[in-house]
């Protein structure tokens, strides 16, 4: 299916959404005890008739989806769900307010003077822009300046999605139940300061600059901002020409797990969400997705989830020092000269000591020393030129003496190279030497071993790697067949 595939290529979602999160200052564990609830008692979305899930509720994590029967791998769980609201991402470059493709400001909406991609989007009768904000912005002559449109992070676009949620709630009272069922983590957002950021980037422009105080107020806008920050999925296409976020009434109720049992896909043209089972899901089990980057280590994943989704993840992967044997956080033990690996004694505690797994070593390293090393290597990784494949390979070779071969700092680069080799100009499959062809296959094999652990089943991550591996393998077989045929011809000629 075309559209957004939520994979490690999506750095975060922002991507992503989570509903049914813990209340403020609670920890989140998707394996905690659960109860199901009569849909009529649930404020918010109700399960569609004949679907394979119901809405459960837990004192620890709130609402979530739970399977009502055995669900087979690859079975569709949520089929093309329509978004409750769609709008531009935060801090985005200027985009069309209907199709969300990048714009240069050369075509403006005839009514409100906001940039659109073309006359096609300007004439859409049911476009989100015409449906919600166009008339209001036109009446207030509220449009971005030329200088603002030249910014790669035009913050005025932050206002559009929250405003649409407010207006939808006003104009469609029958949908208010759905909006009421979505978490916004008001108290926690106030405590960590994001509330004040939203006031500056959304509330003040809408109420003061655009003078829309007759249409909304700070409380409504802050709630809309919270709903988006907690629940929104990213919408993009393979070429990253679309930049949007969307909220869904059922999909956003999926609980988080760093080893999810579903794969999600958003059609960028319709913004409809499809969720399918990546593995068999037994009746009574939570239906989960991941709201963070699969190839990040535990420290970074948990920090990202806390900062963007407002909860502390305590899933089995986060609780395991080896990350279920994937070793995305493991370091080479300096005392063992890399023969054994060092892992955190308590992976849920950022201040934990790290200890060598070698039976005869037991060397311990303080968290400060570990953090200094990782910060230094992260800076070096951030400075890499991803057009320079040799530099990437040198980075991998150089720092493999300090890190596990699967460490997130290395595996992220390896994942990039899996797709670079065979697809980049000068490195197309037919052009590559045997050396790079076999290198691509080796990298794919390494990543596939990780995918089987962290995104088991037919996940998007696994399928993309398998596709790259099979393309390289087919090219290799073709070359071997050609060589064999040429050798046979030479041998036949010698006999003659």
Image (cartoon, grey):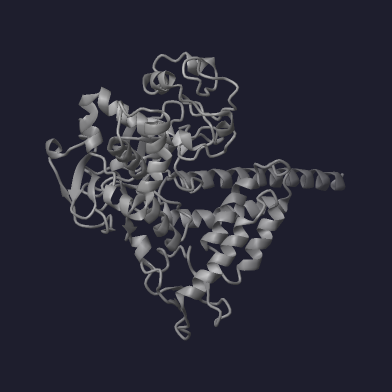
Position of 272 with respect to 94 (left or right) is left
Question: Percent from the top left, x then y, of residue 414?
Answer: 59, 55
Question: Percent from the top left, x then y, of residue 202?
Answer: 40, 37
Question: Percent from the top left, x then y, of residue 11?
Answer: 49, 48
Q: Residue at x 35, y 43 (%)?
A: 73
Figure check: 33 above or below 471: below
The residue lying toward the viewer, choosing from 37 and 245, is 245
Q: Residue at x 30, y 26 (%)?
A: 214
Residue 64 found in image quarter: top left
Question: Percent from the top left, x then y, of residue 424?
Answer: 67, 42
Q: Residue at x 47, y 57 (%)?
A: 296
The residue lying toward the viewer, choosing from 154 and 129, is 154
Position of 92 with respect to 168 (left or right) is right
Position of 131 with respect to 375 (left or right) is left
Figure check: 121 above or below 334: above
Figure check: 219 above or below 417: above
Q: Quadrant of the C terminus?
A: top right
Can residue 48 be seen by looking at this rendering?
no
Query: How many numbered discs?
Result: 0
Figure check: 26 above or below 423: below
Q: Quadrant of the N terminus?
A: top left
Can residue 42 be seen by looking at this rendering?
yes
């Amino acid at each position: 299916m075309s559209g957004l595939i939520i994979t490690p290529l999506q750095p975060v979602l922002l991507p992503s959404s989570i509903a049914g999160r813990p209340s403020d200052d609670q920890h989140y564990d998707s394996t905690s005890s659960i109860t199901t609830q009569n849909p009529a008692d649930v404020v918010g979305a109700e399960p569609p008739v004949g679907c394979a899930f119901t809405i459960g509720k837990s004192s620890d994590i709130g609402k979530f989806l739970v399977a009502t029967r055995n669900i087979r791998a690859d079975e569709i769980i949520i089929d093309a769900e329509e978004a409750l609201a769609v709008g531009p991402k935060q801090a985005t470059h200027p985009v069309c307010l209907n199709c969300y493709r990048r714009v240069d400001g050369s075509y403006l909406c005839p009514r409100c003077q906001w940039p659109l991609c073309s006359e096609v989007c300007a004439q859409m009768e049911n476009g989100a822009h015409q449906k919600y904000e166009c008339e209001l912005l036109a009446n207030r002559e509220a449009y971005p300046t030329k200088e603002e449109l030249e910014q790669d992070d035009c913050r005025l676009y932050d206002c559009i999605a929250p405003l649409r949620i407010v207006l939808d709630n006003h104009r469609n009272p029958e949908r208010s139940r759905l909006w009421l069922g979505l978490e916004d983590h008001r108290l926690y957002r106030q405590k960590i300061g994001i509330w004040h950021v939203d006031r500056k980037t959304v509330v003040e422009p809408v109420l003061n600059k655009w003078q829309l105080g007759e249409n909304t107020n700070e409380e409504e806008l802050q709630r809309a901002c919270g709903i988006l920050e907690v629940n929104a999925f990213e919408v993009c296409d393979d070429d990253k020409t679309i930049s949007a976020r969307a909220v869904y009434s059922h999909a956003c109720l999926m609980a988080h797990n760093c080893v999810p049992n579903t794969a999600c896909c958003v059609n960028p043209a319709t913004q409809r969400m499809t969720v399918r089972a990546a593995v068999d899901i037994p009746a009574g089990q939570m239906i989960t997705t991941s709201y963070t980057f699969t190839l990040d280590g535990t420290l970074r994943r948990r920090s990202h989830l806390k900062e963007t989704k407002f909860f502390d993840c305590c899933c089995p992967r986060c609780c395991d020092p080896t990350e279920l044997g994937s070793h995305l956080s493991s370091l080479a033990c300096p005392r063992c000269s890399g023969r054994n690996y060092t892992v955190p004694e308590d992976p849920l505690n950022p201040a934990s000591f790290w200890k060598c797994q070698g039976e005869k070593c037991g060397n311990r390293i303080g968290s400060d020393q570990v953090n200094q090393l990782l910060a230094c290597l992260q800076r070096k990784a951030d400075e890499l030129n991803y057009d320079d494949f040799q530099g990437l390979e040198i980075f991998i070779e150089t720092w493999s003496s300090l890190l596990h071969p699967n460490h997130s700092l290395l595996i992220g680069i390896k994942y990039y190279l899996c797709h670079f080799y065979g697809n980049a100009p000068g490195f197309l499959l037919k052009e590559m030497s045997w050396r790079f062809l076999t290198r691509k296959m080796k990298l794919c094999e390494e990543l596939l071993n990780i995918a089987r652990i962290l995104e088991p089943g037919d996940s998007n991550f696994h399928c993309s790697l398998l596709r790259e591996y099979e393309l390289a393998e087919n090219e290799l077989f073709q070359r071997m067949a050609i060589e064999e045929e040429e050798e046979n011809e030479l041998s036949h000629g010698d006999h003659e």
